[in-house]
Image: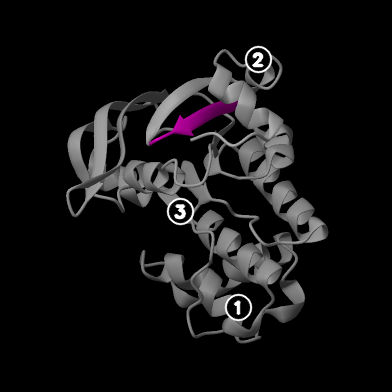
Amino acid sequence: MSRLLPLTVEGAVGRRRSRTLVGPVDLRIEGAGITVVIGPNGAGKTSLLSLLHGTERLAEGRIDWAWPLEDARHAQAFVFQRPVMLRRTVAENIAYPLQIRGVARKEAQARAADWARRVGLGEVLNRYAPVLSGGEQQKLALARALIIEPDVLFLDEPCASLDGRAMREIEEILLAARDRGTRLVMSTHNMGQARRLADEVLFLLRGRIHESGPASTFFTAPETPQARAFLKGDIVE
């Protein structure tokens, strides 16, 4: 179970240039498993994840971890929809988070090689990372995030634009991370994926949490007309 949790959010608001992107949000994340954030385009999914992770400035409210903020920042990671590749090899990309934490180069490289094998990149350790395929880059991004063994991992639509095979491989990596004790909070536009992975669902609408609950009840008996319409594939604004 994550040492960082519970995560308690009270009245959190994210703004950019006086425009409210998300909030106010009240939320509590605890226990193990995968929280999946869904909602129509523009609902604020990315902004919410960024706010929780700390890459989006908190304009109002509170976000409190079980640990002091500085410690919490070092025990979590974020995987973006479009992975950022350092202009280095696969091995150097994966080892980078360890090296900036002071891990000896030899140990960092050994652990990077192990993680590359875990995500299916063991044969391309010395390849220049920016030339990898989209699926390979997303695997690399996951390995780079998971190598620090984060208590909490945020993911912003990690399988967008991937084909079915790559998506299945990414999902297997995520489920393995969950089983090892990493708490996952991820957004997705793919309802099939949400149903496969989610233990808990947050349904966002116009920057706010419109409905939330266990995945088992949300997908079978959503409480609000908007959630029911969204799950049917109707346009919800």
Mark positioned earlier in the residue sequence (3 or 1): 3
The picture places residue 237, in percent across and down from the top left corner, at 48, 35
Numbered disc 2: secondary structure = helix
Quarter of image, res 119: bottom right
Left or right: 15 in relation to 200 = left
Query: For mark 1, what is the residue?
Result: 90
* Labels 2, 1: front one: 2
Tell me, yes or no, if residue 199 can be seen here. no
Q: Disc 2 versus disc 3: distance between alpha carbons?
A: 28 Å
Query: For mark 3, what is the residue?
Result: 78
Instruction: Please provide the residue range marked out in magenta.
Output: 199-206
* Labels 2, 3: front one: 2
- Crowd rating for badge 3 (residues with CA inside 10 Å; few <14, some 14–19, many 20+): many
Q: Disc 3 versus disc 1: distance between alpha carbons?
A: 18 Å
Quarter of image, res 147: bottom right
Left or right: 45 in relation to 70 = right
Query: For mark 2, what is the residue?
Result: 217
- Crowd rating for badge 1 (residues with CA inside 10 Å; few <14, some 14–19, many 20+): many
The answer to whether residue 227 is above or below residue 22 is: above
Q: In the rendered structure, does residue 13 fall within the stretch colored magenta?
A: no
Amino acid type at image mark 2: Thr
- Crowd rating for badge 2 (residues with CA inside 10 Å; few <14, some 14–19, many 20+): few
Q: Disc 2 versus disc 1: distance between alpha carbons?
A: 41 Å
Q: Which of the pair 12/28 is nearer the observer?
A: 12
